[in-house]
Amino acid sequence: MSTININVPDQIMSVIAERARNSGYADVNEYVSQFVLRLSERQSEVEALAIEGLESSPSEPWDKNEIEDIRANLKSKYEN
């Protein structure tokens, strides 16, 4: 197994440590390793979906109202 050393601000380290604890990981190293693995898997999924979309049949462009509806939906979903 390889090892890397990273420096993060104390505030970020506190958040990482808390999330590791709350998620049941043995330690921060295990949490970060799994996080990076999941991130990599998710990126592969997104890339596959993008390729699938590009290879699908042509679509109609969204109009302004559809774009605004998508923005509003995302804002309400992800704003605190």
Image: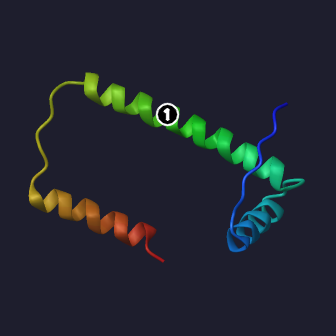
The percent coordinates of residue 25 (x first, y second) are: 84, 54
The percent coordinates of residue 30 (x first, y second) are: 82, 47
Closest to the observer, 17 or 59: 17
Closest to the observer, 14 or 21: 14
Q: Amino acid at mark 1?
A: Glu
Closest to the observer, 5 or 16: 5
The percent coordinates of residue 73 (x first, y second) are: 32, 65
Q: Is residue 48 left or right of residue 1?
A: left
The residue labelled by disc 1 is 45
Position of 6 relative to 49 (above/below): below
Few, some or many residues within 10 Å of mark 1 (<14, 14–19, 20+): few
**How many numbered callouts?**
1
Please name the residue shown 75% across and 71% down the image: 14
Please name the residue shown 54% across and 39% down the image: 42
Please name the residue shown 84% across and 57% down the image: 24
Q: Is residue 59 left or right of residue 76?
A: left
Determine the residue located farthest toward the right in the rendered image: 26
Q: Quadrant of the N terminus?
A: top right
The percent coordinates of residue 79 (x first, y second) are: 43, 74
Position of 67 relative to 62 (above/below): below
Q: Is residue 68 left or right of residue 42?
A: left
Please name the residue shown 64% across and 41% down the image: 38
Question: What kind of colouring is applied to the model shown?
Answer: rainbow
Determine the residue located farthest toward the bottom in the rendered image: 80
Which corner quadrant of the image does residue 60 belong to? top left
Q: Provide the secondary structure element on which disc 1 rests.
A: helix
